[in-house]
Image (cartoon, grey):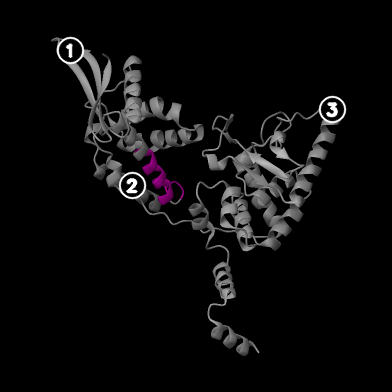
Amino acid sequence: MRGHLVKRYKNSWTVVLDLGRDANGKRKQRWISVKGTKPEAEKVLTDALHQKDTGSLINPSKVTFGEFLEHWLKEYALPNLAPRTYEGYASIINEHLIPKMGVIPLSKLKPEHVRRYYAETLENGRCNGSGGLSAQSVRHHHMAIHKALETACKWGLVFRNVADNVDPPHAEKPQMVVWNEDEVKQFLEAARETRYYALYVLALYTGARRSELLALRWEDVDLIYCQVSINRTVHQLRDGSYIYRQPKTAKSRRTIALPPSAALVMTQYREARDTEAEKVGRKIPEDELVFGDGNGKPIRPNTVTRAWPLLAVKAGVKPIRFHDARHTHASLMLKQGAHPKIVQERLGHATISVTLDTYSHIAPGMQEAAARKFDDLDLIPEAKNGLENKVG
Protein backbone atom coordinates (compact mmCIF):
# COMPACT_ATOMS: atom_id res chain seq x y z
CA MET A 1 0.00 0.00 0.00
CA ARG A 2 1.47 3.33 -1.07
CA GLY A 3 -0.58 5.42 1.32
CA HIS A 4 -3.80 5.45 3.28
CA LEU A 5 -6.03 7.52 5.56
CA VAL A 6 -6.58 7.10 9.29
CA LYS A 7 -9.56 8.85 10.89
CA ARG A 8 -8.70 10.47 14.22
CA TYR A 9 -11.87 12.26 15.28
CA LYS A 10 -14.56 14.44 13.71
CA ASN A 11 -13.13 16.44 10.78
CA SER A 12 -9.61 15.22 11.49
CA TRP A 13 -7.59 12.72 9.47
CA THR A 14 -4.04 11.45 9.23
CA VAL A 15 -2.53 10.80 5.82
CA VAL A 16 -0.02 7.98 6.07
CA LEU A 17 2.46 7.93 3.20
CA ASP A 18 4.60 4.83 2.69
CA LEU A 19 8.18 5.82 1.78
CA GLY A 20 9.61 2.32 1.50
CA ARG A 21 12.39 1.01 3.74
CA ASP A 22 15.73 2.42 4.82
CA ALA A 23 19.15 0.76 4.52
CA ASN A 24 18.43 -1.36 7.61
CA GLY A 25 15.12 -2.58 6.24
CA LYS A 26 13.08 -0.41 8.58
CA ARG A 27 9.83 0.83 7.16
CA LYS A 28 9.65 4.59 6.55
CA GLN A 29 6.43 6.60 6.67
CA ARG A 30 5.33 10.21 6.69
CA TRP A 31 2.30 11.19 8.71
CA ILE A 32 0.34 14.27 7.69
CA SER A 33 -2.47 15.67 9.85
CA VAL A 34 -5.44 17.08 7.97
CA LYS A 35 -8.29 19.04 9.52
CA GLY A 36 -11.27 18.80 7.20
CA THR A 37 -13.47 16.38 5.32
CA LYS A 38 -12.49 13.01 3.94
CA PRO A 39 -12.38 14.34 0.32
CA GLU A 40 -9.97 17.05 1.49
CA ALA A 41 -7.76 14.44 3.16
CA GLU A 42 -7.88 12.30 0.02
CA LYS A 43 -6.73 15.32 -1.99
CA VAL A 44 -3.72 15.74 0.35
CA LEU A 45 -2.90 12.05 -0.09
CA THR A 46 -3.16 12.33 -3.88
CA ASP A 47 -0.89 15.40 -3.91
CA ALA A 48 1.67 13.68 -1.69
CA LEU A 49 1.70 10.56 -3.87
CA HIS A 50 2.16 12.73 -6.97
CA GLN A 51 5.13 14.49 -5.37
CA LYS A 52 6.62 11.15 -4.39
CA ASP A 53 6.20 9.74 -7.92
CA THR A 54 7.73 12.82 -9.55
CA GLY A 55 10.62 13.00 -7.11
CA SER A 56 9.48 16.36 -5.78
CA LEU A 57 8.58 15.23 -2.27
CA ILE A 58 10.68 17.28 0.12
CA ASN A 59 12.11 16.51 3.54
CA PRO A 60 10.77 19.08 6.02
CA SER A 61 13.75 18.68 8.34
CA LYS A 62 16.25 19.71 5.67
CA VAL A 63 14.47 22.21 3.43
CA THR A 64 14.80 25.97 3.88
CA PHE A 65 11.93 28.39 3.65
CA GLY A 66 13.31 29.63 0.33
CA GLU A 67 13.57 26.11 -1.11
CA PHE A 68 10.04 25.38 0.01
CA LEU A 69 8.73 28.59 -1.62
CA GLU A 70 10.38 27.64 -4.93
CA HIS A 71 8.86 24.17 -4.64
CA TRP A 72 5.45 25.64 -3.75
CA LEU A 73 5.48 27.92 -6.79
CA LYS A 74 6.14 24.98 -9.09
CA GLU A 75 4.00 22.28 -7.49
CA TYR A 76 1.04 24.29 -6.22
CA ALA A 77 0.85 27.89 -7.42
CA LEU A 78 1.54 27.29 -11.12
CA PRO A 79 -1.08 24.56 -11.68
CA ASN A 80 -3.73 25.86 -9.27
CA LEU A 81 -3.72 29.66 -9.33
CA ALA A 82 -4.75 32.13 -12.01
CA PRO A 83 -1.77 33.18 -14.17
CA ARG A 84 -1.80 36.79 -12.98
CA THR A 85 -2.04 35.64 -9.35
CA TYR A 86 0.86 33.25 -9.92
CA GLU A 87 2.95 36.01 -11.46
CA GLY A 88 2.24 38.27 -8.50
CA TYR A 89 3.23 35.62 -5.96
CA ALA A 90 6.32 34.64 -7.96
CA SER A 91 7.47 38.27 -8.03
CA ILE A 92 6.99 38.68 -4.28
CA ILE A 93 8.75 35.40 -3.51
CA ASN A 94 11.72 35.78 -5.85
CA GLU A 95 12.34 39.50 -5.36
CA HIS A 96 11.63 39.84 -1.63
CA LEU A 97 10.90 36.74 0.46
CA ILE A 98 13.73 34.46 -0.70
CA PRO A 99 16.46 37.15 -0.52
CA LYS A 100 15.39 38.19 3.00
CA MET A 101 14.06 35.01 4.64
CA GLY A 102 15.05 32.22 2.29
CA VAL A 103 17.89 30.79 4.41
CA ILE A 104 15.70 30.13 7.45
CA PRO A 105 14.97 26.39 7.85
CA LEU A 106 11.28 25.82 7.20
CA SER A 107 10.91 23.81 10.42
CA LYS A 108 12.38 26.70 12.44
CA LEU A 109 10.39 29.53 10.87
CA LYS A 110 8.73 31.49 13.68
CA PRO A 111 6.23 34.35 13.91
CA GLU A 112 9.00 36.74 14.94
CA HIS A 113 10.80 36.10 11.63
CA VAL A 114 7.72 37.18 9.71
CA ARG A 115 7.01 40.06 12.08
CA ARG A 116 10.58 41.37 11.72
CA TYR A 117 10.37 41.08 7.93
CA TYR A 118 7.25 43.24 7.88
CA ALA A 119 8.80 45.84 10.18
CA GLU A 120 12.05 46.05 8.20
CA THR A 121 10.25 46.24 4.87
CA LEU A 122 8.01 49.03 6.09
CA GLU A 123 10.97 50.90 7.59
CA ASN A 124 12.81 50.68 4.28
CA GLY A 125 9.71 52.07 2.64
CA ARG A 126 9.74 55.10 4.95
CA CYS A 127 13.43 55.72 4.29
CA ASN A 128 13.23 55.20 0.56
CA GLY A 129 10.51 57.25 -1.06
CA SER A 130 11.02 55.70 -4.49
CA GLY A 131 11.88 52.06 -3.87
CA GLY A 132 10.21 51.25 -0.55
CA LEU A 133 7.06 49.22 -0.06
CA SER A 134 3.78 50.57 1.23
CA ALA A 135 1.68 48.95 3.93
CA GLN A 136 -0.70 47.71 1.24
CA SER A 137 2.19 46.03 -0.62
CA VAL A 138 3.36 44.32 2.57
CA ARG A 139 -0.18 43.04 3.07
CA HIS A 140 0.15 41.33 -0.31
CA HIS A 141 3.38 39.74 0.95
CA HIS A 142 1.45 38.52 3.99
CA MET A 143 -1.10 36.88 1.69
CA ALA A 144 1.68 35.09 -0.20
CA ILE A 145 3.36 33.86 2.99
CA HIS A 146 0.08 32.73 4.51
CA LYS A 147 -1.05 30.90 1.37
CA ALA A 148 2.28 29.09 1.00
CA LEU A 149 2.43 28.03 4.66
CA GLU A 150 -1.20 26.95 4.51
CA THR A 151 -0.14 24.50 1.81
CA ALA A 152 2.89 23.44 3.88
CA CYS A 153 0.49 22.49 6.69
CA LYS A 154 -1.63 20.42 4.30
CA TRP A 155 1.48 18.67 3.01
CA GLY A 156 2.55 17.81 6.54
CA LEU A 157 5.75 19.86 6.33
CA VAL A 158 4.87 22.10 9.29
CA PHE A 159 2.35 21.73 12.10
CA ARG A 160 1.10 25.31 12.16
CA ASN A 161 0.91 28.37 9.96
CA VAL A 162 3.09 30.91 11.75
CA ALA A 163 1.52 33.69 9.65
CA ASP A 164 -1.67 33.15 11.67
CA ASN A 165 0.14 34.68 14.63
CA VAL A 166 1.33 37.80 12.80
CA ASP A 167 -0.88 40.78 12.01
CA PRO A 168 -0.13 42.40 8.64
CA PRO A 169 0.38 46.18 8.69
CA HIS A 170 -2.72 48.30 8.59
CA ALA A 171 -3.25 50.01 5.27
CA GLU A 172 -5.54 52.98 4.91
CA LYS A 173 -8.30 52.29 2.43
CA PRO A 174 -7.93 54.76 -0.43
CA GLN A 175 -10.72 57.28 -0.64
CA MET A 176 -13.14 56.48 -3.40
CA VAL A 177 -13.44 59.23 -6.01
CA VAL A 178 -16.37 59.23 -8.41
CA TRP A 179 -17.98 61.56 -10.92
CA ASN A 180 -21.38 63.17 -10.64
CA GLU A 181 -23.87 63.34 -13.50
CA ASP A 182 -22.44 66.55 -14.97
CA GLU A 183 -18.89 65.21 -14.93
CA VAL A 184 -19.92 62.00 -16.68
CA LYS A 185 -21.68 64.07 -19.34
CA GLN A 186 -18.63 66.29 -19.85
CA PHE A 187 -16.29 63.33 -20.08
CA LEU A 188 -18.38 61.43 -22.61
CA GLU A 189 -18.78 64.54 -24.73
CA ALA A 190 -14.98 64.83 -24.89
CA ALA A 191 -14.67 61.11 -25.61
CA ARG A 192 -17.17 61.09 -28.46
CA GLU A 193 -14.60 61.41 -31.24
CA THR A 194 -12.04 59.01 -29.72
CA ARG A 195 -11.54 55.33 -30.55
CA TYR A 196 -12.55 54.38 -27.01
CA TYR A 197 -15.91 56.16 -26.90
CA ALA A 198 -18.06 53.01 -26.99
CA LEU A 199 -15.80 51.29 -24.46
CA TYR A 200 -16.02 54.21 -22.06
CA VAL A 201 -19.80 54.41 -22.45
CA LEU A 202 -20.10 50.72 -21.63
CA ALA A 203 -17.81 51.10 -18.60
CA LEU A 204 -19.88 53.95 -17.16
CA TYR A 205 -23.26 52.46 -18.06
CA THR A 206 -22.63 48.88 -16.85
CA GLY A 207 -20.01 49.07 -14.09
CA ALA A 208 -18.20 46.11 -15.65
CA ARG A 209 -14.51 45.57 -14.91
CA ARG A 210 -11.83 46.40 -17.46
CA SER A 211 -10.91 42.72 -17.86
CA GLU A 212 -14.57 41.89 -18.53
CA LEU A 213 -15.12 44.63 -21.08
CA LEU A 214 -11.98 43.82 -23.07
CA ALA A 215 -12.98 40.15 -23.23
CA LEU A 216 -16.43 40.82 -24.71
CA ARG A 217 -17.26 39.21 -28.05
CA TRP A 218 -20.05 40.36 -30.31
CA GLU A 219 -21.99 37.21 -29.43
CA ASP A 220 -22.01 38.52 -25.84
CA VAL A 221 -23.74 41.76 -26.87
CA ASP A 222 -27.48 41.56 -27.55
CA LEU A 223 -28.52 44.83 -29.18
CA ILE A 224 -32.12 43.66 -29.64
CA TYR A 225 -32.81 42.96 -25.98
CA CYS A 226 -30.28 45.61 -24.87
CA GLN A 227 -27.98 43.54 -22.69
CA VAL A 228 -24.42 42.25 -22.42
CA SER A 229 -23.34 38.90 -21.01
CA ILE A 230 -20.23 38.74 -18.84
CA ASN A 231 -18.82 35.22 -18.97
CA ARG A 232 -15.05 35.62 -19.22
CA THR A 233 -12.13 37.96 -18.53
CA VAL A 234 -8.87 38.71 -20.30
CA HIS A 235 -5.48 39.48 -18.74
CA GLN A 236 -2.14 40.38 -20.24
CA LEU A 237 0.79 38.50 -18.75
CA ARG A 238 4.27 39.92 -18.25
CA ASP A 239 5.55 38.28 -21.41
CA GLY A 240 2.94 40.19 -23.42
CA SER A 241 0.66 37.23 -24.05
CA TYR A 242 -3.04 37.22 -23.24
CA ILE A 243 -5.06 34.68 -21.32
CA TYR A 244 -8.83 34.31 -21.10
CA ARG A 245 -10.46 32.91 -17.99
CA GLN A 246 -13.91 32.47 -16.55
CA PRO A 247 -14.86 35.02 -13.88
CA LYS A 248 -13.83 34.04 -10.36
CA THR A 249 -17.33 33.42 -9.01
CA ALA A 250 -20.75 32.44 -10.26
CA LYS A 251 -22.01 35.93 -9.33
CA SER A 252 -19.42 37.45 -11.66
CA ARG A 253 -20.94 35.55 -14.58
CA ARG A 254 -23.94 37.75 -15.23
CA THR A 255 -26.13 39.57 -17.73
CA ILE A 256 -26.26 43.36 -17.49
CA ALA A 257 -29.17 45.32 -18.97
CA LEU A 258 -28.18 48.31 -21.10
CA PRO A 259 -30.02 51.63 -21.03
CA PRO A 260 -31.40 52.46 -24.50
CA SER A 261 -28.87 55.27 -24.96
CA ALA A 262 -25.94 52.90 -24.35
CA ALA A 263 -27.50 50.33 -26.68
CA LEU A 264 -27.75 53.03 -29.36
CA VAL A 265 -24.05 53.89 -28.96
CA MET A 266 -23.14 50.21 -29.28
CA THR A 267 -25.36 49.83 -32.36
CA GLN A 268 -23.65 52.77 -34.04
CA TYR A 269 -20.26 51.37 -33.04
CA ARG A 270 -21.15 47.99 -34.59
CA GLU A 271 -22.31 49.65 -37.80
CA ALA A 272 -19.03 51.57 -38.05
CA ARG A 273 -17.04 48.36 -37.50
CA ASP A 274 -19.10 46.57 -40.16
CA THR A 275 -18.42 49.37 -42.63
CA GLU A 276 -14.67 49.15 -41.99
CA ALA A 277 -14.73 45.37 -42.44
CA GLU A 278 -16.69 45.60 -45.70
CA LYS A 279 -14.05 47.90 -47.20
CA VAL A 280 -11.56 45.03 -47.03
CA GLY A 281 -14.07 42.38 -48.03
CA ARG A 282 -14.48 40.93 -44.56
CA LYS A 283 -17.48 40.07 -42.40
CA ILE A 284 -17.13 40.37 -38.65
CA PRO A 285 -17.63 36.94 -37.01
CA GLU A 286 -19.73 36.78 -33.86
CA ASP A 287 -16.83 35.45 -31.80
CA GLU A 288 -14.65 38.47 -32.62
CA LEU A 289 -13.71 40.82 -29.81
CA VAL A 290 -15.90 43.90 -29.49
CA PHE A 291 -12.93 46.03 -28.45
CA GLY A 292 -10.12 44.34 -30.34
CA ASP A 293 -7.18 45.65 -32.30
CA GLY A 294 -8.55 44.35 -35.60
CA ASN A 295 -6.26 41.31 -35.59
CA GLY A 296 -8.14 39.20 -33.08
CA LYS A 297 -6.20 40.46 -30.08
CA PRO A 298 -7.59 42.65 -27.31
CA ILE A 299 -6.56 46.22 -26.78
CA ARG A 300 -3.67 46.45 -24.35
CA PRO A 301 -5.29 47.05 -20.93
CA ASN A 302 -2.69 49.61 -19.87
CA THR A 303 -3.31 51.64 -23.03
CA VAL A 304 -6.97 52.04 -22.10
CA THR A 305 -6.12 52.84 -18.49
CA ARG A 306 -3.59 55.54 -19.38
CA ALA A 307 -5.83 57.22 -21.94
CA TRP A 308 -8.68 57.61 -19.45
CA PRO A 309 -7.22 60.26 -17.07
CA LEU A 310 -5.68 62.19 -19.96
CA LEU A 311 -9.09 62.50 -21.53
CA ALA A 312 -10.56 63.53 -18.18
CA VAL A 313 -8.14 66.46 -18.01
CA LYS A 314 -9.07 67.43 -21.55
CA ALA A 315 -12.75 67.28 -20.62
CA GLY A 316 -12.18 69.56 -17.64
CA VAL A 317 -13.27 67.07 -14.97
CA LYS A 318 -11.28 65.73 -12.06
CA PRO A 319 -9.10 62.76 -13.09
CA ILE A 320 -10.17 59.40 -11.73
CA ARG A 321 -9.00 55.86 -12.44
CA PHE A 322 -10.63 53.76 -15.14
CA HIS A 323 -11.73 51.37 -12.39
CA ASP A 324 -13.57 54.29 -10.78
CA ALA A 325 -16.02 54.19 -13.70
CA ARG A 326 -17.34 51.09 -11.92
CA HIS A 327 -17.72 53.00 -8.67
CA THR A 328 -19.29 55.93 -10.50
CA HIS A 329 -21.89 53.64 -12.06
CA ALA A 330 -22.79 52.14 -8.69
CA SER A 331 -22.99 55.47 -6.87
CA LEU A 332 -25.20 57.06 -9.54
CA MET A 333 -27.55 54.07 -9.53
CA LEU A 334 -27.89 54.18 -5.75
CA LYS A 335 -28.53 57.92 -5.82
CA GLN A 336 -31.28 57.29 -8.37
CA GLY A 337 -32.95 54.93 -5.90
CA ALA A 338 -31.90 51.58 -7.40
CA HIS A 339 -32.14 48.71 -4.92
CA PRO A 340 -28.70 47.62 -3.68
CA LYS A 341 -29.51 44.05 -4.75
CA ILE A 342 -29.78 45.23 -8.36
CA VAL A 343 -26.50 47.11 -8.06
CA GLN A 344 -24.88 43.97 -6.61
CA GLU A 345 -26.08 41.90 -9.57
CA ARG A 346 -24.87 44.42 -12.13
CA LEU A 347 -21.42 44.68 -10.54
CA GLY A 348 -21.08 40.94 -9.94
CA HIS A 349 -20.36 41.22 -6.23
CA ALA A 350 -20.40 37.90 -4.37
CA THR A 351 -22.78 39.22 -1.69
CA ILE A 352 -24.96 42.24 -1.15
CA SER A 353 -22.95 43.08 1.97
CA VAL A 354 -19.95 43.84 -0.25
CA THR A 355 -22.06 46.32 -2.20
CA LEU A 356 -23.46 47.96 0.92
CA ASP A 357 -20.08 48.17 2.65
CA THR A 358 -18.44 49.64 -0.44
CA TYR A 359 -20.99 52.22 -1.53
CA SER A 360 -23.29 53.16 1.33
CA HIS A 361 -21.13 56.17 2.26
CA ILE A 362 -20.72 57.66 -1.21
CA ALA A 363 -24.34 58.58 -1.94
CA PRO A 364 -24.95 61.77 0.10
CA GLY A 365 -28.47 62.17 1.38
CA MET A 366 -29.50 58.49 1.04
CA GLN A 367 -30.04 58.02 4.77
CA GLU A 368 -31.77 61.38 5.10
CA ALA A 369 -34.10 60.52 2.22
CA ALA A 370 -34.86 57.14 3.80
CA ALA A 371 -35.64 58.84 7.11
CA ARG A 372 -38.05 61.26 5.42
CA LYS A 373 -39.63 58.35 3.56
CA PHE A 374 -40.34 56.66 6.88
CA ASP A 375 -42.52 59.61 7.85
CA ASP A 376 -44.85 58.68 4.99
CA LEU A 377 -46.12 55.89 7.25
CA ASP A 378 -47.76 58.60 9.38
CA LEU A 379 -47.08 56.81 12.65
CA ILE A 380 -47.25 59.98 14.78
CA PRO A 381 -50.21 62.06 13.53
CA GLU A 382 -49.62 64.92 15.95
CA ALA A 383 -46.04 65.23 14.72
CA LYS A 384 -47.29 65.49 11.14
CA ASN A 385 -49.77 68.20 12.14
CA GLY A 386 -47.01 70.07 13.94
CA LEU A 387 -44.80 69.93 10.88
CA GLU A 388 -47.61 71.15 8.63
CA ASN A 389 -48.32 74.05 10.94
CA LYS A 390 -44.62 74.90 11.06
CA VAL A 391 -44.39 74.87 7.28
CA GLY A 392 -47.58 76.91 7.00
Q: Are marks 2 and 1 in contact (CB under 8 Å)?
A: no
Counting from the top left corner in percent of width and height, residue 159 is at: 23, 35
Q: Badge 1: few (under 14), some or many (20 or more) residues near its Cα, within 10 Å?
A: few
Counting from the top left corner in percent of width and height, residue 82 is at: 49, 33
Indicate the quadrant where residue 377 lies. bottom right
Q: Name which residue type carries label 2.
A: Tyr
Can the viewer see residue 35? Answer: yes
> Dot 1 lies on which element?
loop
Q: Name which residue type carries label 3.
A: Val
Q: Is residue 119 above or below residue 22?
A: below
> Dot 3 lies on which element?
loop
Q: Is residue 55 above or below residue 218?
A: above
Counting from the top left corner in percent of width and height, residue 24 is at: 13, 10
Query: Mark 1 — residue?
Result: 22
Q: Earlier in the sequence, mark 2 or mark 1?
A: 1
Q: CA distance from mark 2 to mark 3?
A: 58 Å
The residue that appears at 63% across and 87% down in the rendered structure is: 391
Q: Magenta region, mostly helix, strand or loop?
A: helix
Give the residues drawn in magenta, as a range: 130-145
Query: Mark 2 — residue?
Result: 118
Left or right placement of residue 139 versus residue 314 in this view:
left
Q: Earlier in the sequence, mark 1 or mark 3?
A: 1
Q: Badge 3: few (under 14), some or many (20 or more) residues near its Cα, within 10 Å?
A: few
Query: Is 42 contained in the magenta span?
Result: no
